[in-house]
Image: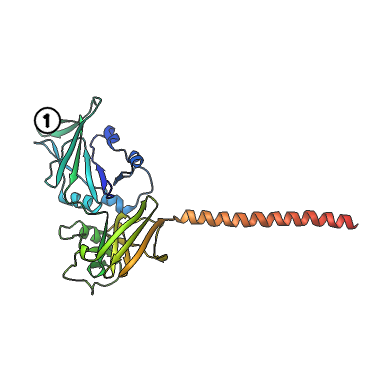
Amino acid sequence: MKDSSRLLDISLQKDLQNLDNSDFNMIYGIANIKEYVGLFVLRQDFLNRTTTLIDHATKAVRIPAETKKVWDLESTRFYLSDIPIDDPDLVLRKTEKYASKYDHRLDILQENGLTSIETDRAYLYESKNYYPRANLISAKNAIYMKHDENHAENILKAVISSDFDPSKNVIIDSDKDNSNLNSDNIESGDVGNYDFESYLPQNMKVKINIREDSYFVLSDTFYPGWEAKVDDKKVVIDKANYAFRAVFIPKGEHVLQMYYQPTFDQLGKSLTEVGVVLLFFGLACFIFLKFGKMIRYERK
């Protein structure tokens, strides 16, 4: 997990979600694409409405191509399931039988009756084709999709298409034109390199050295309250690849910082500052009035 890849728990039994509870994973610093509590972002919610299929013959999970593309976009490296997964792009790394017996099974209603799948163990798979958590994409390879009535739906269709390769291109929500789009598609590895100095839940810092203007694309959710600075100068975070983040970086060596500073937090600080000022003002008025009366009394 040191490369900041993610884990996906596709357990099918509700009572077996403790295989990787969406909050419990935080104790071990394991990134999980599922959420349990928090404010939902509509686009991320659409991405999470993915489906899997059950092969009745083999009693295994099959993953549709579009679902797999979504999970790859979210940089999902490991899959945790309570029944086998039949997919050529996944490698079974470990099978662990439960220490205690669970009286659970998956019941599938078929035309010829009810088929049951026992769920007495966990299966850990690793993806062969997951995309890295962060990437550098040449600005010449950025695809700008204009805002219109159906632009969100169009972007979603584009990113899950088999023709879209996020290692070569990035789709930016913008009204810019695509006149500078490079038809040759410069490989991301040719642009330059980056190195994370820190990566924490509410802030990150990364050193970037690139030979041409590029986008630093991060497969973390585009969420209100996140801000960015390049060399301590505030910059815009673009919505990229439907639901993620990207920051434009000019060529050269730079330091990028992203930090979470929600509006209500800023408002709270402002109200606190105003409250402190009013408190001192009220205290000063009280002292002035109190000692003013004493001085007038002594003069009398």
- Describe the colour scheme in one phrase: rainbow
Q: How many marks?
A: 1
| Residue 92 on image: x %, y % | 16, 40
Q: Considering the image in quadrants, where does the C terminus appear?
A: bottom right
Q: Tell me the residue at 38%/46% (across/down).
A: 38
Q: Is residue 252 left or right of residue 226?
A: left
For the question of whether residue 148 can be seen, the reply is no
Q: Tell me the residue at 28%/32% (across/down).
A: 15
Q: Is residue 280 left or right of residue 48?
A: right
Mark 1: amino acid? Gly
Q: In this rendered view, identify the residue nearer to me: 156 or 95.
A: 95
Most distant residue in the right direction: 300
| Residue 216 on image: x %, y % | 30, 62
Q: In the rendered image, which residue does mark 1 sit on?
A: 113
| Residue 193 on image: x %, y % | 26, 62
The local secondary structure at tag 1 comes to strand
| Residue 85 on image: x %, y % | 15, 40
For the question of whether residue 71 can be seen, the reply is yes
Q: Tell me the residue at 33%/43% (across/down).
A: 29
Is 198 located above or below residue 24 in the figure?
Answer: below
Q: Residues within 10 Å of mark 1 (few under 14, many from 20)?
A: few
Q: Tell me the residue at 22%/50% (across/down).
A: 71
Q: Quadrant of residue 297?
A: bottom right
